[in-house]
């Protein structure tokens, strides 16, 4: 019989070890006396599957049978030892253990692995249970060590934000580690803030805080990548803070920022007017008064009223486990809490966030913390948050609850994974793509100029096919070059029409690629029989421009909401998603690419079978023609989009560069092959240019001879 809450403990294949109990949806690690890893950076783990209807069931123990390897780094052994002892530590031992963790990770963050994050999160989670005595304040026992705990925990958070993003994401996906670490540290800090009066302490604080830090009733801790404010609004009138950049060229940590404390009487307009404002939040007086009036119903009235504000330099602790798309923050992250008070607010809380990249489509969202119950994990959510305007790239967000806030953007090709060893890769790829799209548009413009200048050229069969493909590719390039600047129409119907139009354009482009694949196959492989059907251009036009109307029309009229921006994502682009994206876009593209690839391979196989009696020079010319055909077909048939499929699946840097160096240049390659390298079009242009040069020369000569025949004019 299964439990509807947990998976029961179970012995493992390793002698004397057990899989501990685990809540449904969570992964646990093997209880080992001697630390070992199943592969570099990972310790044996297992997930509790199931749901609350059928109960919890352990996943297969395939990982359990892997060879056990000792950890490569001594730092890992130290963190494992602290983790193992953390559940048995007394309160007076925790301070030393926290300092021990900081001593290890201070110079180790660049080499940390997912299991190191797991050990740190597990240890601090155990410290929370000891310090808070299962959720209750234990101020008498904690004594005067609270400031030390503040500083040590802040150091841990600051150091951990130097860890590679992919490592943090892996630790979250496998062990729920970043979720647990964030929850544990915030719980300790929030509870400590109510344990005694708020006072500044210079023991572990530096002098970068400015005069604001001397405000009575406030405590401000500032670390390289983490800033913490604890304020008693009844004593200090302080309810928030603002971070202001002093160095506009570098942004490596908070060393280049000043902190300004904000009071309950500050206004949104005054805050937005702060020069070089990066991020800020405060509780206005009207909201504070309402919270105090509702306090007996939302919190324990015996708990002192405190405001706790934390600012995180990056999103290392805010890792989503969603399988659809990677999403990232477009600014710093601020967390606002009132310990003991519920998260829902009687009116909206103002949050000010400067966007790192103003060209991205991003939205105001909050971190929805969930304790990994089944498949529903912590994630960014826009519910209850709205954007109230933007001034100098600083967005004013207003949210109806208290938690962590930032600006979030959608990253459909997994660009986060590119930043591990190549922090500038995304910018380079964007530049390559933009250059390719612009060059392709100029190339397609050259094709159409050729068609306009030489009307008889348009009568050729190949030209008609080329013009249709070029027109479709041009529309597609324009869409993907400027899609980031498209603003969602206010009317949902117009937004759905815009999304359906983009859907239709993409399908039309791939249909023309399929037509060309068929024609090239008939030309190079099927060399006997009727190679081209009657009225081929007319039939190809009807199929390529007409057939995509079927899936687009079906999804549009069935449910046009499929073309509206998804509510749980941040992009404002009207684009197909869910069933319309999968069945109406991705599957057709995958099928067309499969057929085109098969045609490409068959054509190149037949073309490469050259006769044996060719001379060396003839054989060399044949090889050059084969190479040119290979490049032409590769771009004509859209095979570069296969690299895009690889990016979506693996988010690998190599595939990203291959895709960006090929797909956007399709229009340029069409121009080079059909205009520059085609003898017939070269002759047309050579003749035309010669005529223009001759006419201009004759006109110039005539003008010169006329002017020389006139008598001079004397003053």
Image: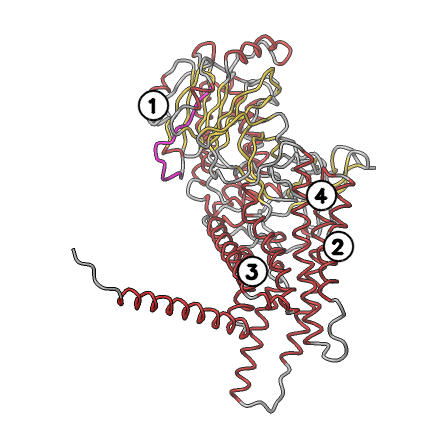
Element type at mark 3: helix
In the depicted structure, whether residue 101 falls above or below residue 702: above
Q: Estimate the x, y position of residue 129 in percent, counting from the top left.
A: 59, 26
In the depicted structure, whether residue 101 falls above or below residue 445: above
Q: Bounds of the magenta span?
A: 240-251
Residue assigned mark 2: 547
Considering only order in the chain, which callout, 2 or 3, is on the residue closer to the N terminus? 3
CB contact under 8 Å: marks 1 and 4: no
3D distance between C-alphas at marks 1 and 4: 51 Å
Considering only order in the chain, which callout, 1 or 2, is on the residue closer to the N terminus? 1
Residue at coordinates 62% horizontally, 52% vertically from top-left? 648
CB contact under 8 Å: marks 3 and 2: no
The quarter holding residue 515 reads bottom right
Q: Estimate the x, y position of residue 294 in percent, counting from the top left.
A: 61, 10
Q: Nearer the viewer, mark 3 or mark 4?
A: 3
Asked if one can make out residue 493 in the rendered structure from this viewpoint, the answer is yes
3D distance between C-alphas at marks 3 and 4: 37 Å
Q: Nearer the viewer, mark 1 or mark 4?
A: 4
Element type at mark 4: helix
Residue assigned mark 4: 578
Q: Nearer the viewer, mark 2 or mark 1?
A: 2
Answer left or right for 207 relative to 570: left
Residue assigned mark 1: 210
Residue assigned mark 3: 448
Element type at mark 1: loop
Q: Estimate the x, y position of residue 139 in percent, counting from the top left.
A: 52, 17
């Amino acid at each position: 019989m299964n439990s509807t809450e947990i998976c029961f403990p179970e012995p493992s294949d390793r002698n004397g070890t057990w899989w501990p109990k685990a809540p449904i949806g969570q992964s646990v690690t093997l209880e080992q006396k001697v630390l070992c890893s199943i592969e570099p950076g990972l310790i044996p783990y297992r997930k509790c599957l199931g749901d609350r209807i059928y109960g919890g069931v352990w996943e297969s123990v395939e990982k359990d049978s892997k060879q056990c390897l000792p950890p490569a780094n001594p730092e890992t052994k130290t963190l494992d030892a602290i983790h193992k002892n953390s559940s048995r530590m007394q309160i007076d031992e925790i301070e030393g253990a926290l300092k021990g963790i900081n001593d290890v990770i201070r110079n180790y963050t660049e080499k940390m692995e997912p299991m190191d994050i797991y050990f740190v999160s597990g240890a601090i989670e155990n410290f929370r249970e000891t310090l808070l005595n299962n959720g209750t304040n234990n101020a008498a026992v904690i004594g005067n060590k609270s400031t030390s705990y503040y500083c040590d925990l802040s150091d841990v958070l600051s150091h951990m934000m130097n860890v590679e993003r992919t490592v943090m994401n892996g630790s979250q996906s496998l062990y729920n580690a970043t979720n647990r670490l964030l929850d544990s540290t915030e719980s300790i800090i929030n509870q400590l803030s109510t344990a005694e009066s708020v006072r500044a302490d210079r023991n572990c604080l530096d002098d970068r805080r400015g005069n604001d830090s001397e405000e009575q009733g406030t405590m401000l801790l500032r670390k390289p990548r983490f800033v913490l404010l604890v304020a008693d609004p009844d004593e200090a009138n302080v309810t928030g803070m603002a971070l202001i950049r002093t160095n506009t060229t570098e942004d490596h940590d908070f060393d280049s920022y000043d902190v300004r404390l904000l009071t309950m009487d500050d206004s949104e307009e005054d805050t937005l007017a702060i020069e070089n404002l990066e991020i800020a939040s405060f509780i206005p007086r009207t909201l504070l008064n309402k919270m105090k009036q509702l306090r007996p119903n939302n919190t324990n009235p015996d708990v002192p009223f405190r405001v706790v504000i934390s600012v995180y330099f990056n999103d290392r602790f805010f890792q989503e486990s969603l399988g659809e798309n990677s999403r990232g923050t477009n600014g710093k992250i601020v967390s606002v809490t009132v310990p003991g008070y519920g998260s829902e607010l009687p009116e909206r809380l103002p949050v000010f966030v400067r966007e790192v990249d103003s060209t991205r489509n991003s939205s105001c969202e909050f971190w929805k913390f969930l304790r990994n119950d089944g498949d529903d994990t912590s994630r960014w959510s826009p519910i209850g948050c709205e954007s109230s305007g933007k001034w100098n790239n600083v967005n004013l967000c207003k949210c109806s609850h208290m938690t962590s806030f930032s600006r979030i953007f959608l990253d459909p090709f997994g660009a986060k994974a590119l930043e591990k060893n190549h922090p500038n890769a995304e910018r380079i790829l964007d530049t390559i793509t933009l250059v390719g799209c612009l060059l392709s548009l100029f190339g397609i413009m050259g094709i159409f100029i050729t068609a306009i200048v030489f009307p008889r050229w348009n009568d050729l069969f190949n030209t008609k096919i080329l013009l249709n493909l070029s027109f479709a590719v041009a529309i597609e390039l324009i869409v993907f070059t400027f899609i980031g600047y498209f603003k969602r129409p206010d009317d949902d119907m117009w937004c759905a029409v815009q999304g359906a139009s983009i859907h239709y354009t993409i399908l039309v482009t791939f249909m023309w690629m399929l037509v060309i694949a068929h024609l090239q196959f008939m030309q190079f492989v099927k060399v006997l029989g009727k190679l081209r059907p009657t009225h081929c251009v007319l039939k190809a036009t009807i199929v390529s421009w007409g057939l995509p109307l079927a899936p687009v029309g079906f999804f549009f009229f069935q449910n046009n909401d499929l073309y509206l921006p998804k509510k749980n994502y941040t992009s404002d682009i009207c684009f197909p998603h869910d069933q319309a994206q999968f069945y109406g876009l991705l599957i057709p593209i995958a099928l067309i690419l499969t057929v085109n690839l098969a045609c490409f391979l068959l054509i190149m196989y037949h073309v490469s079978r050259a006769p044996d009696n060719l001379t060396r020079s003839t054989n060399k010319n044949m090889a050059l023609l084969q190479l040119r055909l290979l490049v032409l077909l590769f771009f004509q048939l859209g095979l570069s989009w296969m690299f895009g499929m690889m990016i979506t699946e693996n988010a690998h840097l190599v595939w990203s560069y291959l895709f960006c160096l090929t797909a956007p240049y399709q229009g340029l390659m069409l121009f080079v092959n059909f205009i520059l390298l085609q003898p017939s079009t070269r002759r047309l242009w050579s003749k035309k240019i010669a005529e223009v040069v001759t006419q201009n020369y004759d006109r110039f000569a005539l003008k010169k001879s006329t002017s020389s025949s006139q008598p001079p004019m004397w003053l």
